[in-house]
Structure formats: C-alpha cells, structure tokens
Image (cartoon, coloured by chain):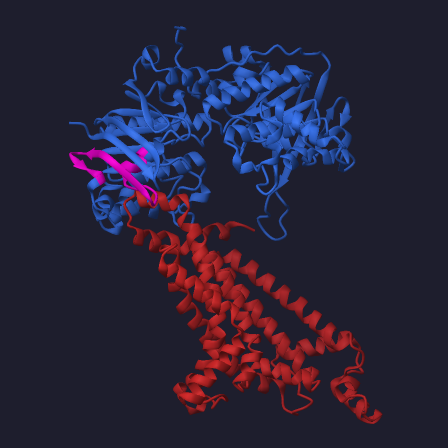
C-alpha cells in the first residue's frame, strides 16, 4: 500500500509539472506580447514597456517560468495588474467561498444520490425505481442556472426565506454563511445527484448480478445483508470515479451559478480576470484549479486501493 | 426417512415450464449424481431446494428436507437453513468469491451470519475448515484475497464456506466444470472425503457422465425438465434403459470416423519457438522481469493430419496458438506454413495468414451481436483485400457445408443455439478455404450430444476439403477421439509427443500419466 501511495504521489508530481509548463506556454508564450495584450491596442509604448519590466517579460521564457514556479512554491502568486493586490490574497478569499460551496453541493448530492441509487437498484422495475429514474432524467435535462433562477423566484422573491444572492462572509457566523450557500449548492447538486444516482444504480445492479452475491445468499445472508456486506463496496468503484470528477468540476465549473447568485467565488474570479485581461490572475487560478483536480484524483486513487485489494498489487 | 426428498416438483418461470414432476431422494452419506445437458433443469432443481429461484418462478410439489417442506418455508426460515443445514458450491470458482474481502472473512461469515460464534471463534473455525479442504495456514493465511489464488484453490475456499457449519446436505452444481483435469480430480476426491467424514448427503450436479460414473451412489438423468432415468450408481451404465441415457453415454465417448489422407510433407512447422512476456517491475528502476510462456517449442503438422495439443491452464498453449496465428510476434524461432514464414519482418504475412483460420471456445462471446451472419462469416475476406463479387454465394455454400441453410445468413447470431453458433464459427473458418484450422477448445463449451455432432462434422469436413487440424484442448477424451498425434505441453515446453493411441496407452512422461489418470473415464459397456 505504501509503494502504491508513493507511486501515485510521483505521478501527481509529474502531472503538476507538466500542467504548469502547459499553462505557462499557453498563456505567456503563445499569444504574442502579454503586456500589450493586457493594456489593449491603444496603450502608450512607455506604459507597455513599464508593464513589461514589472512582469519580468524582459527575461527569457525559461527564466520567467522558473521565477513563476518558484513563486508559486513559496505561496507568491504575483500581483494582480487590475486590482493591484497580491493574487494569493484574492484567491484565498475566493477559495473560502468556492471550497465550502463545492463541498456543500457534493455532500448534498451524495446524500441524495446514494439512497436513491440503492432504492432504485434493489427495487428494480418497481414504482420507486421508475420514479427515481424519471426524476433523475429531469435533473440531468434541466439546465442548473434555470433551476437556480427558479429557486430564487420561489424562495427568495416570493417566500423571502433566503436572500437572492451575495455572500455575507463567514464573519457573520456559520449559519448565515451556509444559508447563503444553500440555494447555490442545491442548484449545483441537482444535476450531479441525478448522474450519481444513476451511476450508483447501474453499478449496484451489475454487482448484484455477480456470482459472489449468489454465493453469499447460499451462505444464508438475507438480501439486506448481502447488499450491505458484499454489494455496496464493490459497487463503489465507478461511483467514486464520478464523485472525483464532479468535485473537480464543482470547484471550477460553478461560474454560471456563482454569477446567478452573485457569489465571490473562484469561477467568477477567473471570468472577471479573463474579461479584464489580467493574465497573472488567470494563470495562477488555473494552476490552482489544476492542482485541485490532481489532488482529488490522487485521493480517488487512494480510495480505490482502500476498497479493492487487487489494485494495491498492480502496477 | 430420506434427508432430502423431492416429490413431484414442477416449476414455471413467468409461465414457461422449466421442471415437470421431478422426484428423487438424497440420504445421509449418499452421493446422488444429477446429470443432464444444458436446459435440462438440473440447476433449477438445486436452486429450488435452496429457495434461491429467480424472480417470477413458481414451484409446485414438495421439497422435504429433514421432514420440513422447503417450498412452504418463509424467507427467514430459508436464510437460517442456507449455509447451516444445506451448503452449496457453484460452478465458477473464479467469480464465486467477493474480490474485496479476504478468504478468512468470507469463510468466517458463514459462521457469523448464523450466530454460531464470536468473531474470534468464527475466524478460528475458518482456519480449521480451510485446513480441512487442503489450504494449510502456512501457505494460505486467512488474510489472502481471492485474486491471489488459483481456480482450484478458490473452489476449495467456496467448499470451505459451504461446509463450515457441517451442513447435512451439500449441493455442488458443476463444481469442477471450469477446472483442469488434475484439479478436477482433486476437488472430487475432496468432496468424496468430506461426505465420508461428515456423513452428509451430496447432490452432485454435472453434465459430465465421467465425473459421476465412479462416484455416485445414485444416478438421476434429466432431460428437458424431467427425470428420464434413475438408478443405483454401481453398474448403472450396464443397466441403463432409457434411449436418452444411452444416447448421452454414447455421445460422451463418441469417436468420429476419419478417413482423411495424411501426406508426408509438413504443412505447419514450428521451429524452436519461444515467447516471453514482460512482467511488472518490482521497483521503478529495477530491470523488467520476464516470464517465458513458450519455451523452445518445435513440432510440425503434416497435411491432412489432426494434431492434438493437450495441457492445463497456464501451460502456454494459448500463447502458442496466438503465435501461430500471427497475432503476436515471437522472440525466438520461426513458424512456417508451407515453407513460408508467418511473419516477414515485423508484419504478418497475409498470403500465409489466409491459409489458416481459427475456431474459439466460446460460441457466445466470439461473434459481434450486431452483425448479420452473412457479414460475420464473410469477415475473413479482408485477408484477401476485398470481398469477391460472389461472396454471398460463398457464404451460403459455407453455411450449407456445416449443416445450416444458406438463408440463415440473413439472421442475427442470437437466433442460434450454442451448437449452431459453433457451426457458424466453423463456416467462418472455412470461407477462405484454408488449409489449416486451429480449434482452440472449440467443443469444450458444448453439451456432449452437440459435441459429438460437431466432431463428426469436423471429421467430414477434413475429408471433403482436405483440412489439417490443430486441436487444442484440456479435454483428453476429445483429443483421443479426433487426433492422430498428440503433444503434451507443460510450463511452456512439450513434454511428450507421439501417436495418440500410443501416448494414451503407454504414457512415458510422469505428467502425461497424471493427466490420463485424472481424466474421468466412463466404464466400458458391451454394446447391447
């Protein structure tokens, strides 16, 4: 297991190194001069020259890459050109919204999807199954920003239970923070839960068809015991894959929902930085998101190995 | 009173009749063999006893175990009985165990689930039972996982789970079908010993008459959901009356008539072939380890000859087959057909490749279900570059030569039975008029009566088209029936080679002797 973990760690480090090069090349090298790009076509030559100096563009690309990565490793993400504040501060501020939101949505989606998938699989073909499959079909089909606006209409404007958007900050207390994140989290969780429930159902149906389930029944286990002791753990592998993908997506892909609810999250930060041509911020946030994705994948890999002994030996 | 009495058991699944008036008994310490081909209802009979019938099944009649009718028992009562009063062993040891739990936990579960002891006691019992089935502690600690064991070892674990609580009745449904002959013999000996030691009844279900011939105290022959004949095991085949039983017996030891001419010049020459596989590295920068699957093998097949290649799983026979077919390159040696190499450089020599075709074991998995038969059979034409203009006529002719109709080419593969599918596979192999056909366990998955027909067909085709066969099988009786010469392969090497009759009559190598001794054999019965 230790060897497996070390190997996964090695592959994590390699992924990050490769990703950093790709991001650096894509943003700094390819589209011409970043300074004139950031300042727009009407900029005066001396302003461009000043920015070039500030960005270190007079250094060679390898030197700049090393300076950038060196900074990242020390937590120095550079200074935003538009806001004139350290990028690290901006990111950590936004992360305090995006990370809780992603975790909240993931928790909601898992809490709903697991029971729904299990009920649908164990009562295959029943009204329950048909109902769950119908609802999840709808959950996947409905665009989540539309669903988000619908919820704002019902719960914020008509019922006035929630505010229509914005984030009060965690200083206002845990409850106030969670309350502000509830509607966004529900809108994010809806499609995720629908997909997860369907994956859970089909994984469980496949597992329940396996020979070892029949063997367990022949030992005298009841249906419920078979499900708990043998089927669930085996069905978890495809489900974990999806959870890993979903978490990465939630962290970065919540842009639309963040915009609907005026949440100061990472997604909006990327969006705003791109509009403002603030390449320093874009570069760092994208790198951070890549880091999150790679770390989540690493965690999923470890979870696989914890579940399935066959994976610990292989490779 | 019998331990188990099945009385007029009838079964229908969603209205379709499966069993009709099945009756037989199992006494304590008695081995009852239930024999039948696929679809005979033998497994459904066992599942009726266990109360594990599929959804939509309706059973009538009585299944009386120790005086209690199990068909009338509640699910809770049945759960209490399964694993404690009645144990069951299934066919597929490779998939019968939960891959994510240790063997210790799985055997102990039988004890735990029935409340027969604490966790520690259950683990102690698991250890004891695993020892009993021949998995000693030093080599098979409780912490082993199923994927670390071979098929035969896994089947021992399944048996350990079934007998952990010393049930009065053990049901074994094709317990050795998926195993090699030597492993099969060991498992059968183990079952026999357990029956003798514990005095339990054993209901042994099989399609193979040979397996039960010298083991069962009582024989029950089933066909299409009915018991057609029953009788004491001793001397059963001398007394058998029912035409189906006789047909089954004859099909089991069927020897097709072969009159093909064998020429002197070789068609296939395999010279000193070796094939290595790279294994996973033990450490990141450690040298890659290699596994030699085929080790310096040489042989030849003459035109018109039928050569058998016998060996157990893992002996390298599949690797050798793939090498001959040009699916994999070999590291050493060469393979020639008609004096031409299969590989020229690193590419398969198509002109040579089209002289041979292959028929695989699984008639269900080896066809694309979305293609019509015409397209399936015509597929080898890609070796010619393009399909000839008369390809449909040729497909029709190939289908007719294997006993099907030309019109069958418009059907899909699911419309055919296992035996018919294997005929289609043979038609596919014949379409290019090859000279060599490799039969890789081609009849192993078939019922004995179907197998006999396919063997006759192969003998007939060999004569009509001047075919040469390489017959690869783990089943000695089949190889004996259809080959002129036989090679015995073990751990990548050919350990014995000779005319089939001689090798079977006077095996030289110790391994060949073991194989022949382990193979179940039917008693000789004088023709009546």
Residue B469 quadrant: top right
- For residue B201, above or below residue A300: above
Instruction: Please state which of residues A134 and B45 is positioned toward the viewer in this rendering.
Output: A134
In percent of width and height, residue B183 lies at 43, 28
Q: Residue at x 45, y 55 (%)?
A: A203
Instruction: Please state which of residues B124 and B363 is positioned toward the viewer in this rendering.
Output: B363
Question: Which quadrant of the rendered structure holds the N terminus of chain B?
Answer: top left
Residue that extends furthest to the front in the rendered view of this protein: B407
- For residue A154, above or below residue B127: below
Residue B394 quadrant: top right
In percent of width and height, residue B308 lies at 58, 20
Q: Residue at x 46, y 68 (%)?
A: A193
- For residue A278, above or below residue A22: below
The reply, left or right, for residue A221 in relation to residue A177 is left
B147 part of magenta stretch: no
On the question of residue B293 being in view, the answer is: yes
Question: Which quadrant of the rendered structure holds the C terminus of chain B?
Answer: top left
Q: Which residues are magenta?
A: B45-71
B53 part of magenta stretch: yes
- Chain A hue? red
Q: Which chain shows up in blue?
A: B
Instruction: Please state which of residues A296 and B366 is positioned toward the viewer in this rendering.
Output: B366
The reply, left or right, for residue B421 in relation to residue A156 is right
In percent of width and height, residue A220 lies at 27, 45
On the question of residue A307 being in view, the answer is: no
Q: Residue at x 61, y 38 (%)?
A: B372
The reply, left or right, for residue A184 in relation to residue B30 is right
Q: Residue at x 79, y 36 (%)?
A: B345
Instruction: Please state which of residues B65 and B344 is positioned toward the viewer in this rendering.
Output: B65
- For residue B463, above or below residue A286: above
In percent of width and height, residue A170 lies at 45, 88
């Amino acid at each position: 297991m230790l060897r497996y973990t070390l190997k996964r760690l090695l592959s994590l480090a390699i992924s990050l190194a490769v990703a950093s090069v790709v991001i650096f090349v894509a943003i700094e090298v390819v589209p011409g001069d970043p300074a004139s790009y950031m300042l727009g076509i009407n900029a005066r030559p001396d302003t461009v020259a000043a920015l070039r100096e500030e960005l270190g563009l007079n250094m060679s690309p390898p030197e700049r890459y090393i300076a950038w990565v060196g900074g990242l490793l020390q937590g120095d993400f550079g200074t935003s050109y538009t806001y004139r504040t350290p990028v690290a501060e901006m990111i950590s501020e936004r992360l305090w919204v995006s990370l809780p939101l992603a975790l909240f949505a993931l928790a909601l989606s898992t809490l709903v999807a697991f029971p729904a998938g299990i009920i649908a699989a164990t009562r295959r073909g029943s009204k329950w199954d048909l109902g769950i499959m119908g609802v999840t079909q709808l959950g996947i089909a409905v665009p989540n920003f539309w669903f988000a606006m619908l919820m704002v209409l019902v719960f914020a404007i008509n019922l006035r239970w929630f505010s229509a958007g914005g984030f009060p900050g965690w200083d206002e207390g845990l409850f106030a923070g969670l309350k502000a994140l509830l509607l966004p989290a529900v809108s994010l969780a809806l499609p995720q839960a629908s997909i997860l429930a369907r994956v859970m159902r089909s994984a469980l149906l496949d597992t329940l068809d396996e020979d070892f389930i029949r063997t367990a029944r022949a030992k005298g286990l009841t249906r419920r015991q078979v499900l708990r002791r043998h089927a669930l753990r085996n069905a978890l592998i495809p489900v974990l894959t999806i959870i890993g993908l979903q978490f990465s997506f939630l962290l970065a892909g919540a842009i639309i929902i963040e915009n609907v609810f005026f949440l100061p999250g990472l997604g909006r930060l990327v969006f705003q930085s791109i509009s403002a041509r603030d390449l320093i911020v874009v570069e760092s946030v994208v790198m951070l998101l890549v880091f999150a994705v790679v770390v989540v994948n690493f965690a999923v890999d470890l979870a696989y190995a914890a579940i399935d002994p066959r994976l610990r030996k292989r490779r | 009173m019998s331990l188990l009495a099945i009385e007029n058991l009838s079964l229908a699944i969603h209205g379709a009749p499966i069993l009709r008036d099945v009756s037989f008994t199992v006494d304590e310490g008695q081995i009852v063999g239930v024999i039948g081909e696929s679809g005979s209802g033998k497994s459904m009979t066992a599942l009726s006893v266990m109360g594990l019938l599929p959804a939509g099944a309706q059973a009538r009649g009585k299944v009386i175990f120790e005086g209690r009718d199990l068909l009338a028992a509640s699910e809770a009562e049945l759960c209490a009985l399964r694993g404690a009063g009645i144990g069951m062993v299934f066919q597929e040891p490779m998939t019968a165990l939960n891959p994510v739990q240790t063997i210790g936990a799985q055997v102990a579960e039988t004890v735990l689930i029935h409340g027969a002891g604490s966790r520690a006691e259950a683990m102690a019992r698991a250890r004891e039972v695993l020892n009993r089935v021949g998995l000693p502690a030093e080599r098979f600690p409780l912490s082993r996982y199923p994927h670390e064991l071979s098929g035969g070892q896994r089947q021992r674990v399944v048996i350990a789970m079934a007998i952990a609580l010393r049930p009065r009745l053990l049901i074994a449904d094709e317990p050795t079908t998926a195993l090699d002959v030597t492993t099969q013999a060991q498992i059968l000996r183990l079952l026999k010993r357990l029956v003798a030691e514990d005095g339990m009844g054993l209901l042994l279900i099989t399609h193979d008459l040979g397996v039960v011939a010298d083991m069962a105290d009582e024989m029950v022959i089933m066909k299409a959901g009915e018991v057609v004949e029953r009788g004491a095991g001793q001397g059963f085949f001398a007394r058998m009356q029912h035409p189906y039983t006789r047909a089954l017996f004859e099909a089991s030891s069927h020897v097709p008539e072969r009159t093909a001419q064998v020429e002197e010049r070789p068609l296939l020459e395999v010279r000193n072939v070796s094939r290595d596989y790279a294994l996973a590295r033990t450490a990141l920068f450690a040298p890659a380890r290699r596994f030699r699957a085929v080790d310096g093998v040489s042989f030849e097949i003459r035109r018109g000859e039928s050569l058998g290649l016998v060996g157990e799983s893992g002996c390298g026979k599949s690797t050798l087959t793939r090498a001959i077919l040009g699916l994999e390159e070999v590291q050493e040696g060469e393979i020639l057909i008609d004096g031409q190499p299969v590989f020229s450089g690193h590419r398969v020599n198509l002109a040579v490749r089209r002289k041979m075709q292959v028929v695989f074991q699984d008639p269900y998995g080896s066809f694309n279900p979305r293609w019509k038969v015409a397209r399936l059979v015509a597929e080898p034409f890609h070796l010619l570059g393009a399909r000839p203009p008369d390809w449909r006529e040729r497909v029709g002719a190939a289908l007719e030569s294997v006993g099907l109709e030309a019109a069958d080419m418009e059907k899909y593969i699911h419309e055919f039975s296992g035996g018919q599918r294997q005929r289609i596979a043979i038609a596919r192999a014949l379409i290019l008029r090859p000279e060599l056909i490799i039969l890789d366990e081609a009849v192993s998955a078939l019922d004995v009566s179907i197998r006999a027909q396919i063997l006759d067909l192969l003998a007939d085709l060999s004569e009509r088209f001047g075919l040469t066969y390489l017959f690869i099988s783990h089943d000695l009786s089949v190889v004996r029936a259809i080959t002129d010469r036989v090679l015995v392969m073990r751990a990548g090497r050919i350990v014995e080679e000779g005319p089939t009759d001689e090798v079977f009559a006077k095996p030289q190598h110790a391994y060949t002797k073991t194989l022949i001794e382990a193979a179940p054999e039917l008693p000789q019965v004088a023709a009546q």
